[in-house]
Amino acid sequence: MTVNHPDALYRIALSLCDGVGPILAKNLIDNLGSAEAIFKETDKGLAAIPGINIKVRESLRAEHPLKRAEKEMSFIEKNAFLMHFYQDTSFPRRLKHCADAPVILYQKGNLNLNPSRSIAIVGTRSVTNYGRGFLEDFMPDLKAFQPQVISGLAYGVDAIAHRESVNHNLKTIAVVAHGLDSVYPALHRGLATDILEKGGAIITEFLSESKPDRENFPKRNRIIAGMSDAVIVVEAARKGGALITADLAFQYNRDVFALPGRYRDTFSEGCNLLIKSNRANLLESAKDIEYIMRWQQKEQVQQAQLPLFDDMSAEEQNLISAIGVDSQPKEIEWLANKLELPMSKLLVQLMNLELKGLLVSMPGKRYRLG
C-alpha cells in the first residue's frame, strides 16, 4: 500500500495514539470499520467499545497523532517507501495471524513480503568462529530451497546471515528497531545498501526519527519471529534477544532450530537449553531443515509437479500455482484475494482438487498440496 490510500493518514495516526496498541487498534477497526471512522466516532460511541477508557478517547481526540501522521506521509512519499496495513494483502500473511502483530509496517525496497518460504536466522552479537563457520557452510546448502532470509541487521550472527544471503543471491529482509531514515548500527550502512541492491528489503514498524531504543528491540524480534516459517538460533547465551525471538517463535507455533555447542561455551548455552527443553530442533545442516520442514529443493518440486497439470483445467492450474508447491498451507482468504475469486467459486474448486487427491484441507480453513 502507498500513501495514496484514502485511509492512510488515519491508519498512521491510529498507531501513534497513546494507549492504543496493536490488539486494541484491531478491535477498534473491527467495531467501526476503518481508521478514519475511529477518529470521527462520537465519544459516546467510543465509550461503548470494550477496552476504550477515557484516556484512550482523549488520545483519539488529540491533534498530535494526525499532525505527526501528515509528516510521516510526506516522508514516505518523498522516499517512495511502502506502507502495509494489517488488512492489506501485501502485509506479511504469516505475521497477520499473530495477535500482537503491528498494524502498520514501513518498507524500503520492493520485495514481496509473502514468499512461499521464509526463515529467520538470529544469534549472538559476539559470534565465534564456530558460528561464523557454520553459517558459511550452511547458507550455500540453504540456497537450494530459496527461502527469504530474515534477520535484524545487528552485529554478529545477524550481519553474517544477511551477508551470506547477499553472497548467495538469497533475498533477505532486515527488520530494524528504528525508523527508515537511519541505519543502526551505522557500520552496517554498506550492508543495508547491498541488501536493497540485491532485491531485499528493510522493514520496521517505527516512524522516521525513531531511535533504536532498548525497548524497541523485543518489538522488532516479534516481527522477525512472526514473519518466518522457522527460526534458526546460531549461538546464543542463556539470556538475550535471540532467546526472546526463539520463545516468541515457539509461542507463534513456528518451528525453531538451534545449533548445538560444547557444554561450557557461553554462547552455546542458550542453544543447548532450547534443544534440551524441547523448544528447538537440533540443527547440523540444511538437511535438517529439509526433513523437519518437509521442504523440497526448487528443481525437484518443479519436476515432480509438471505431470499434475496435464489433467487439470486452467482455473485448477492457477489455484495449484497459488497454493504453491512448498507444502506451506495457504489461508482461504488469501487465496480468494490472490486469485480474485468469489468465495463460493473458490470453495467448489478447492473441493474438486481435494477429491482428486491433489489438496489437503487443514484446520483454520487452510490448504496445502496433497
Image (cartoon, rainbow, N blue to C red):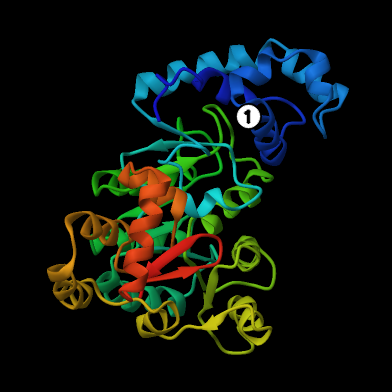
Q: Secondary structure at mark 1?
A: loop
The answer to whether any part of residue 336 appears in the image is: yes
> Residue 60 location, x and y as percent?
73, 18
Q: Residue 217: x and y, percent?
A: 62, 49
Residue found at x 45% / y 30%:
181
Left or right of 272 in this view: 157: left
Tell me how many marks there are: 1
Q: Amino acid at mark 1?
A: Ser
Location of residue 113 with respect to 206 vertically, above or below: below
Where is residue 265? Give x, y as percent. Answer: 60, 83
* 185 lies left or right of 40: left
Residue 214 in the image: state x and y as whole percent: 67, 45
The picture quadrant where one finds residue 305 is bottom left
> Can residue 188 be seen in the rendering of this structure?
no
Name the one closer to the observer, 7 or 352: 352
Q: Nearer the viewer, residue 235 or 76?
A: 76
Instruction: Judge whether 45 appears above or below 270 on screen.
Output: above
Please give the name of the residue rendered at 39% of the width and 79% of the height, measured from the top-left corner: 294
- The quarter in which the C terminus is drawn is bottom left
Write the residue at 78% across / 21% down: 46
Q: Which residue is mark 1?
A: 15
Q: Residue at x 64, y 83 (%)?
A: 278
